[in-house]
Image (cartoon, rainbow, N blue to C red):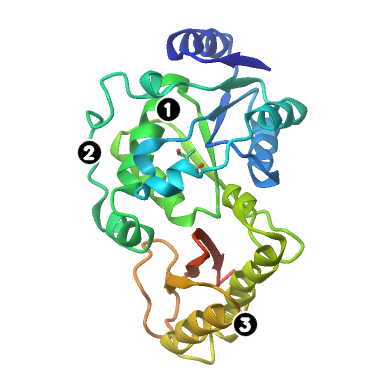
């Protein structure tokens, strides 16, 4: 694996590989890697000649400064994990490589309503920050395929929209969520949970499954309320949302709707750690 810290030599290196006919797959990350991230690398390796990853904890996508400060950093073990997974190129840029004109000077994207729903509602500005860093990384790496984890379901929709807005020739490939045995979705933020909190946190997946099992017999609002109450009883401090939504637009679906594919999404806090997860209901 070759490690780059600067954008210009990385772009040059990748462009030589592309000129020789290699296809380029890219899995951007914020580090603190777990098996979910590694599955993105493995997927890329099955369909692309060269796999590139990046580690950059992007300050502009954190609406809560404490969340940014406490974001886990495990760079040494991340590098070993990527190397063992067979990643070919790793980019670990500084803030000035990603935001050469300075933070706050990056573009604003017209993402439409998706930016205001769910994560967008509870984390104002989050998706603008995600788009700023992803746009810059795509400009540098210019991959043919971009690999994203389904755990960040809304992020996948937003990034597809970004690629469409910028008219880039990139396939965005969503890779399924990796879970602990308990059902807890793997997440870098799980590193901040105690052993007991990790067990409590499995209630999110339990509720997603409950919603899936009962989706045809109960009104959506009943299922959403039941799940939110259950999470609080299971030790969660607060629930930002439980939403049964249209899987494409994330607009709430209030009734048992025919023909529309749905997804259930949850965001909730254990202590000050915010966890998100989702489950497709109609597949
Ligand atoms: O999903 C993440 O880890 C981040 O949001 C991403 C896509 C790497 C952008 O910083």
**Placement of the C terminus among the 4 image quadrants:** bottom right
Left or right: 123, with 149 as reference point = left
Viewer-nearest residue: 12 or 80: 80
- Residue drawn at 44 percent across, 14 percent down: 7
Instruction: Looking at the image, tell me whether mark 1 or mark 2 is earlier in sequence order.
Output: 2
Q: Position of residue 8 (x, y in %)?
A: 43, 9
Q: Is residue 126 above or below residue 42?
A: below
Q: Position of residue 100 (x, y in %)?
A: 31, 18
Instruction: Looking at the image, tell me whether mark 3 or mark 2 is earlier in sequence order.
Output: 2
Helix, strand or loop status at disc 3 = helix
Residue bearing mark 2: 108
Give yes or no for contact between labels 1 and 2 (Cβ–Cβ under 8 Å): no
Left or right: 271, with 76 as reference point = left
Measure how far apart labels 1 and 2 are at the Cα level.
16 Å
- Residue drawn at 28 percent across, 29 percent down: 103
Residue bearing mark 1: 138
The image quadrant of residue 254 is bottom left
Residues packed near mark 2 inside 10 Å, few (<14), some (14 to 19) or many (20 plus): few
Residue bearing mark 3: 213
């Amino acid at each position: 694996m070759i490690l780059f810290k600067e954008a210009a030599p990385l772009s040059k290196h990748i462009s030589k590989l592309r000129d020789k006919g290699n296809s380029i797959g890219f899995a951007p990350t914020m580090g603190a890697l777990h098996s979910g991230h590694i599955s993105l690398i493995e997927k890329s390796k099955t369909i692309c000649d060269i796999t590139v990853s990046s580690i950059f904890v992007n300050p502009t996508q954190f609406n809560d400064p404490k969340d940014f400060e406490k974001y886990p950093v495990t760079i040494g073990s991340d590098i070993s994990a990527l190397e063992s997974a067979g990643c070919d190129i790793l980019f670990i840029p500084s803030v000035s490589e990603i935001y050469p004109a300075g933070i706050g000077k990056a573009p604003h994207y017209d993402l439409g309503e998706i930016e205001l729903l769910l994560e967008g509602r509870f984390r104002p500005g989050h998706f603008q920050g995600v788009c700023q860093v992803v746009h810059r990384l795509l400009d540098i790496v210019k991959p043919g395929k971009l690999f994203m984890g389904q755990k960040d379901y809304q992020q996948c929709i937003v990034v597809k929209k970004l690629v469409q807005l910028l008219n880039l020739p990139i396939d965005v490939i969503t890779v399924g969520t990796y879970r602990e045995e308990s059902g807890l979705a793997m997440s870098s933020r799980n590193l901040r949970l105690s052993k007991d909190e990790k067990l409590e946190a499995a209630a999110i997946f339990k509720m997603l499954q409950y919603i899936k099992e009962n989706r045809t017999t109960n009104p959506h609002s009943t299922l959403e309320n039941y799940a939110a109450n259950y999470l609080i009883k299971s030790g969660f401090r607060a629930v930002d949302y439980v939403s049964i939504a249209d899987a494409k637009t994330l607009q709430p679906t209030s009734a048992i709707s025919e023909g529309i594919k749905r997804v259930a999404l949850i965001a909730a806090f254990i202590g000050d750690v915010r966890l998100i997860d989702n489950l497709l209901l109609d597949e």
